[in-house]
Amino acid sequence: MVHSKAKVIYTIIVFIALAAFDNIIIGLFPPLFRYIAKDLDVGIAKLGTVSAINILVTALSSLYWGYLSGKHKRKNLIIIGTLIWVVSVFLTAASQNFIQLLLFQILTGVGLGCIASIGFSILTDYIPHHKRGLVLSLWGMAQGLGGILGSLMASLTATGTSWRWPFEIVGFIGLFLIILYFFVEEPPRGQSDPELKKLLKTGKIYSHIIEAKHIPAILLKGSNVWLFLQAFFMNISTGSLIWIPTLFIYKIQQQGYSLATATIASGYLYAIFQLGGMTSAYFGHLGDKLQAKTYKGRAYITSIFVLLTMPLYILMFIIPMNDLYLPNNHHVLSILFSLIKQIFTNPWIASLFILSFFASAAQSANTPNWLALITDVNLPEHRGTAFSVANLSNSLGRTIGNVGVGLLLGIISSHVHEPYSYIVTLSLLQMFFLPSAISYILMAKKNVSDIKAVKATLQKRS
């Protein structure tokens, strides 16, 4: 029993760590744009397109991975997918021109697609149904931390070495993960659903698998439709946020610092300003509590926090970095200590920190409750596919947000100079938090009927 419990905890830890990697690779790009552009002799806007295509291919490939997860052994699939993205990341680091960079990032996206759909499918079979929000918040936090880690890794290593080195580091970590996969334990499908406990205790298995004819019903299910729309709108706004380090670089350079110093400082600030995301576990727990009282609970509480995210980020973009003091010696630790000190001594930086904390905290309420809802309203064999379709919607929004920054900048920059062009652009894209919050309110009623239908079906099959 102890051995089995340890295996479960080990498996959950491995897959939560895995969740960080698609966001690490996405987070690597923006701080490196200037360095890659100079080395490969391409425009920065083209590199934004590479990042957007990687996100889109990841989402599209996750559809197929998600479908496979409902039919085959998921442990083998995750090893194959990880091998694909690890090799592609190493090839990215060796790119000699724009075409190679684009091709290898497309291949990386094909491999990364397995992370979200298959990792999610395995985790939801391990997590007790009454703790879905809490544990899935760790999955969401890992994704958020992945973006921060990618940005930090790029900012801290590229200035002293090369833009290629961060990709090589990620590749080596991926190789280590493959070794860890051999020791994970794949759970029986449906293990976390209380309606199936009696069936599984008798030694039988939940034998239902997804079939192609199920897909239309998954796509048209009321709760799923609103979850897809919510993810799409929200990620237009959050997809634009990967440009925050670029905004910080311009703001810091506006204070008279070099590009190298600004790049290092922006990476630190981006990481520090995402600390509010650590509250995700609390919001997941809060969602669990409210969902136990009413199946509308998660949707209503999450809509409130999503709506609050919008004005908090806009205010954060607007506040300047006046009176910023940094050592202009490119020394990473001295820059870090100086920034931390100014959170307590510089009212402008303190205000930025407070706003960013509450903005990232409000945003963090979305992920655990969204993940728990898409688990609750779908049958075990449908969850990988439903999540993959939702992840496609998520990534389409993120791609539009990412590309939208470049397109809007082209228009706004003809009237306003940096960093103000970035402030206006990013602020406009935060408006999509509004339809995202409305989607939660409209889905609440559907949640009730869809969750009851899932429970009734599982009870019947048990």
Image (tube, helix red, strand yellow):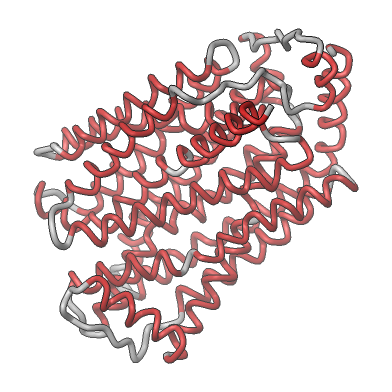
* Vertical arrangement, residue 71 with respect to residue 168, above or below: above
Q: How many marks?
A: 0
The image position of residue 306, as x and y in percent, is: 65, 58
The image position of residue 222, as x and y in percent, is: 76, 32
Q: Nearer the viewer, residue 77 or 103?
A: 77
Q: Nearer the viewer, residue 369 or 78?
A: 78
* Vertical arrangement, residue 39 with respect to residue 61, above or below: below
Q: Is residue 64 left or right of residue 7?
A: left
Q: Is residue 178 left or right of residue 293?
A: left
What residue appears at the point 84 percent right and 12 percent down from the top-left corner? 461
The image position of residue 205, as x and y in percent, is: 72, 10
What residue appears at the point 55 percent right and 60 percent down from the top-left corner? 277
Q: Is residue 304 left or right of residue 123?
A: right
Residue situated furthest front in the rendering: 2
Q: Nearer the viewer, residue 438 or 150?
A: 150
In terms of image quadrants, where is residue 6? Answer: top right
Location of the N terminus (image quadrant): top right
What residue appears at the point 74 percent right and 42 percent down from the top-left corner? 131
Q: Is residue 435 visible?
A: no
Location of the C terminus (image quadrant): top right
The image position of residue 83, as x and y in percent, is: 33, 24
In terms of image quadrants, where is residue 246? Answer: bottom left
* Vertical arrangement, residue 46 with respect to residue 326, above or below: above
Q: Is residue 169 visible?
A: yes
In terms of image quadrants, where is residue 393? Answer: top right
* Vertical arrangement, residue 183 with respect to residue 337, above or below: above
